[in-house]
Amino acid sequence: QVQLVESGGGLVQPGGSLRLHCAASGSIFSIYTMGWYRQAPGMERELVATVTSGGSTNYADSVNGRFTISRDYAKNTVYLQMNSLKPEDTAVYYCNARIRINFTTLTDSWGQGTQVTVSS
């Protein structure tokens, strides 16, 4: 009923930048928090950044000051601008959204993931 489609991953050298994009579509009544998580090989999925429906943002300490999350409310889209990338940022990045489908149903939706590789 709800789809999150991510794009923007790829290979970049240390110190470079990438911008991730995630669009939500389907049976959407409203969207609360949207965010990005990442999972490196052999590691658990971890929070990168979130933005609430009111615009409040939250960042992992490891990315604070380098990454910026933003949201286009009209387009049900969230972005992650990643600057000064480091090899340790290498991971699969997942979009997440808490979506109200109707008056009684909330769903926690995930995208399929996009690979970010930081390497020289």
Image (tube, rainbow, N blue to C red):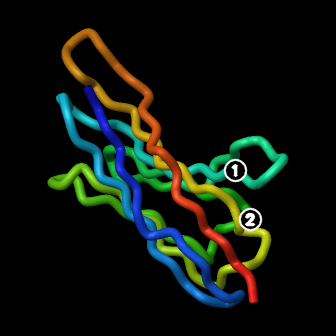
The label number, if any, that marks residue 72 in the structure image = none
Q: Is residue 59 above or below residue 31?
A: below
Q: Is residue 109 above or below residue 6?
A: above
The residue that appears at 35% across and 44% down in the rendered structure is 4
Q: Position of residue 64 (x, y in %)?
A: 65, 68
Q: Amino acid at mark 1?
A: Gln
Q: Is residue 43 left or right of residue 29?
A: right
Q: Secondary structure at mark 2?
A: loop
- Residue position marked by numbered label 2 in the rendering: 62
The residue that appears at 20% across and 13% down in the rendered structure is 103
Query: In front here: 4 or 75?
Result: 4
The residue that appears at 57% across and 56% down in the rendered structure is 93
Q: Is residue 110 above or below residue 41?
A: above
Q: How many marks?
A: 2
Q: Position of residue 89 (x, y in %)?
A: 71, 68
- Residue position marked by numbered label 1 in the rendering: 39
Neighbor class of circle 2 (other Cα within 10 Å; few <14, some 14-19, many 20+) is: few
Neighbor class of circle 1 (other Cα within 10 Å; few <14, some 14-19, many 20+) is: some
Quadrant for the N terminus in the image: top left
Q: Earlier in the sequence, mark 1 or mark 2?
A: 1
Q: Amino acid at mark 2?
A: Ser
Q: Position of residue 58 (x, y in %)?
A: 55, 54
- In which quadrant of the rendered view does residue 65 lie? bottom right
